[in-house]
Image (tube, coloured by chain):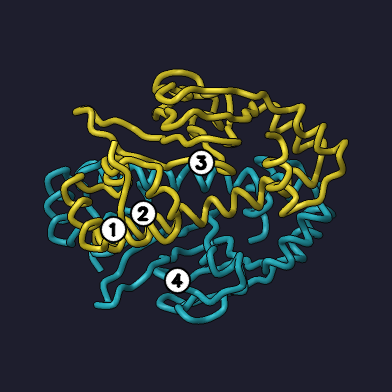
Chain colours: A yellow, B cyan
Amino acid sequence: MDHMLRRQIEKIVPLTDSEFDHVLSFFVKKKYRKHQFVIQQGDPVNYEYFVVSGLLKSYILDESGKMYIMQFAMEDWWFSDYTAYLNGAVANSFADCLEDSELLGITKENKDKLCREMHKIEHFFRVKSNYGYVALQRRIFSLLCNDTQKKYNELFELYPSLFQRVPKALLAAYIGVSRETLSRLSISSGRKTQED
Amino acid sequence: MDHMLRRQIEKIVPLTDSEFDHVLSFFVKKKYRKHQFVIQQGDPVNYEYFVVSGLLKSYILDESGKMYIMQFAMEDWWFSDYTAYLNGAVANSFADCLEDSELLGITKENKDKLCREMHKIEHFFRVKSNYGYVALQRRIFSLLCNDTQKKYNELFELYPSLFQRVPKALLAAYIGVSRETLSRLSISSGRKTQED
């Protein structure tokens, strides 16, 4: 299970076996079952997570209990409640598992220490953070400009595999529309999504 | 004008005079007049910019010419069309000056070289990128969850000085509402914004 992280890092910087073992020693392995919570609103957020296998959703609930999905996270993706993680605050969001999931978690202290020790790992994380920034910018533009059909198409183009694994109600919560609206779209475009 | 960049870097990592001179040698100084374009859709994006003085807006136009504002950038802020800048592509967005502006620009090649040479500058940029990521996450939540009044209040709490410097129509384009809607809000909350 560890090679997936190595493959991702080595797309950006090369690592020897012993270097990768050193990197990996800064992470803890965690296993969660479907429906289990990894991050809970009001709790400290001790880890940033790399998804080795499985699928999760990260979201907030408003006062009325309505869910807004920040992101899905599947194999090879990173997630956390970054505001809390970076500032040592408690979570404003939730993250729970849509499938059984294996994660690698790294504390902020360990990440900072690893980055101090290994310049190339600091480089790796800077590059990943830049990619993440660009992905969020794209999402903001999509939320501002696109109608529902375009948001749906964009999500499908970017992450086609999500549509096989994520219930329709959650795709709707990601796009910010009702499930009924999304159903009409997915039918009209002939794409089949998973029913929960 | 150079000390503003140094102050920002030194909030995260200390620099000697000669180190800062070295950092600064990787940047080019640029001056723009009010209404001048810094980034134009379809053009290459050669620089990431640090704002030494002035105020700019970064935005896209949809097919009908409607404007959607990605961000404002004032003193001490960074901006670019990051998708284009990082991938060597042409801009999808525009950036122009709301006030006369002095910028420091750094090419991707120079930024990568500087980060390779000076580990602590790579650290600085990683930390800044993390902060930027968190700010964008906050904006996504705001776009997904908040009604117009809440978006307006949040923008005001985060960046009160914008309300003195940015025309009301542009604040409306940032929040994603009509100018008329924003006018009702700003009147009802007793806040005075700039008229263009």
Which residue position is annotated with label 3? A74
Task: Please state which amino acid type lies under the numbered disc 4.
Answer: Ala
Task: Between residue A101 and residue A19, name the one nearer to us.
Answer: A101
The reply to whether dot 1 and dot 2 touch (C-beta < 8 Å) is: yes
For the residue marked with disc 2, what is the amino acid?
A: Leu
- Provide residue B166's location: percent of width, then percent of height: 32, 61
> What chain does mark 2 sit on?
B
Instruction: Point out which mark residue B171 bears.
Output: 1
Chain hosting mark 3: A
Mark 3: which secondary structure? strand
Lower position in the chain sequence, tag 4 or tag 1: 4
Confirm whether residue B109 shows in the render. Answer: yes
Residue type of the residue flagged with mark 3: Met
Query: How far is mark 4 from mark 1, CA to CA?
Result: 15 Å
Residue B15 higher or lower than B89, as above or below: above
**What residue is drawn where x is 52% and y is 52%?**
A133
Mark 2 or 4, nearer chain start? 4
**Mark 1 to mark 2 CA distance (whole Å):** 9 Å
Q: Is residue B177 above or below residue B130?
A: below
Q: Are marks 3 and 2 on the same chain?
A: no
Q: Secondary structure at mark 1?
A: helix
Residue indicated by mark 4: B95
Q: Determine crowd level at label 1: few under 14, some 14-19, many 20+ residues with C-alpha closer than 10 A.
A: many
Q: Quadrant of residue B86?
A: bottom right
